[in-house]
Structure formats: structure tokens, C-alpha cells
Amino acid sequence: MSVLYDVEEEKKYVYTKKITCTNCEAHFDDLRILNSKLRRKEPDMDLRPRFQFVDSLKYGVTSCPYCGFSAPIKSFEHLTSLQQKRLREKVTSQFMQREPFHGEVIDYASAMGQYELALVCAMVMEVSLSEQAYLCLQLSWLIRGRLEEADAEPGLLEEDAYKQLQEKEERYYKQAYDSLSKAATQEDFPICGMDQNTFDYLLAVMSFHFKEYDLATRYCGNIVQTRGVSSKLKDKALSLKDEILAAKKAEEEAAG
């Protein structure tokens, strides 16, 4: 049986940090990644990060077990009084307290739950559209990781559960794509930490996924024609453009 990530190996890249919730001031322990030890691998075509021995995405959100406030690590400590009021009215008031997490690593199911709660909190707090979109994208990436884990361990998921996860991954991916496309017309760069060329490349990959070939080609063309873009990104855009044109041609020939 091939294991995607070995738990004992993953423990070496994780540490416990004591957290004070910005919303309710409760204290709890949170698991974090030792970023200095990570060994980067080639990312997926859509920029999903990959590291050896651990999926860092699982550790990207902090979630308070007492009030339900959940957010990406970088923004967990920053709450306005208005956001706090909204959280307490619409999240904490309905949240069922749970036992603090005491595991040594975070599994995909737990991570997905934290990200979904973070998405609810983001919508309640009315954070930027791009921030909400990026949570959707990360959720789709997490589900992809869960499916890869199931592929590596036959029998881990029932067929129906596997199919439901595939459908869920696609829904979050589409939600992310629609919102990121809209954010590009409303927000200034950088967006989600990306400059415009990197962002255009991501949208090119996503529009290709949804078979919007002409749009995907235009995104690639914008990158190639822009001065100052790194040769690596230009090469990736040119390679992607070739794939798009080949897929479009094959689809047209199949349609007769």
C-alpha cells in the first residue's frame, strides 16, 4: 500500500503554538508548520503548493474551538470591532463548543472543516471578494489532496464518498474561479499575494479547466506580451497555450 504522507514523518514538520482568540479571548493550542524545514516540490499547474512529506495547506487556518472564529493564520489576529460584532451575532451565537484539538497532525477531514468555517466567517465579516475566493481555491486544493490520499490508499474511501468529494472539489473550484475573475476587475494588485501576471496565469489554468479556451488563450497572450515577466512564467504560459490550442482542436474535430 502506498501512503501519500507518513504521519510519523509529518510530525517532524509540525509544532504546537499557544493562541489567544482575537474574538473571544480564549486560550488554546494550534498546530503550525515549521516553514524553515519545508522542502518545496514543483507545484500543480494551477499553483497549488507542494512540499515533501507534508501538505502545508492543512495547517493554513486557525480555528477557535470555543467561539468558532476561524481565519487564515496571517489574518487571525486582526479583527475590527464591527467584524467582531458580526462574528458574535452570526457565528459564535450558533457555534457548539468542542474539545480543543489534541492531535499531533491535522488530517484532511479536520482541515477541510476548519477552512469551511473560515469561509463562513469571511463571508460574515465581509472581507474582500479575493480573500473569500482564495479560501474556496484552497478548499478545492485540500479536497484534491484528500482524493490523492485515497488514490494512494485503496479502500480509504467508499466509491460514493469519493465521487461526492470530486463534486465538492469542482464546486469550490468554480466558486473560486468566478470570484477571482470578478475580483480582478474590482481590486488592485497584488491580489492574494500575486502580481497581475501570476494572477493571469492562474486564471488561464482555471479557464482552461472549464473549457473556456479563447479566454484562457488571451490570458496566456497577455503574459507573453508583457515586458518584464520572468522567462519561467512566460515559458509556462507558452506551454499552457499549446495545451489549450491542442485541446480546442481535438474537441472541434470530435464534434465533426
Image (tube, helix red, strand yellow):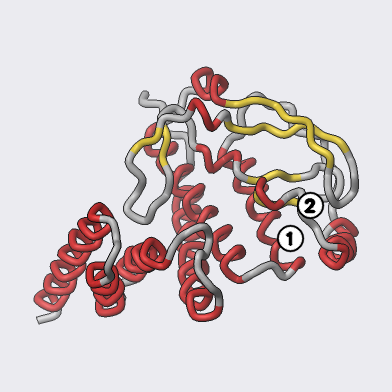
What label sits on residue 121 in the rendered view? 1
Give residue 46's position: percent from left, percent from top: 37, 56
Q: Nearer the viewer, residue 47 or 107?
A: 47
Q: Which amino acid type is marked by label 1? A: Cys
Q: Which amino acid type is marked by label 2? A: Phe
Residue at the (90%, 59%) spot, across then down: 93
On the picture, is 65 further left or further right than 12? right
Q: Quadrant of residue 203?
A: bottom left
Q: Nearer the viewer, residue 132 or 174?
A: 132
**Mark with earlier residue (1, 2):** 2
Residue at the (23%, 68%) spot, across then down: 224
On the picture, is 46 further left or further right than 186? left
Give residue 184's position: percent from left, percent from top: 48, 75
**Farthest residue toward the front?**
228
Residue at the (76%, 49%) spot, across then down: 77
Label 1 with label 2: CB-CB less than 8 Å:
yes
Circle 2 sits on which residue?
Answer: 69
Q: Nearer the viewer, residue 212 or 34?
A: 34
Q: Quadrant of residue 129?
A: bottom right
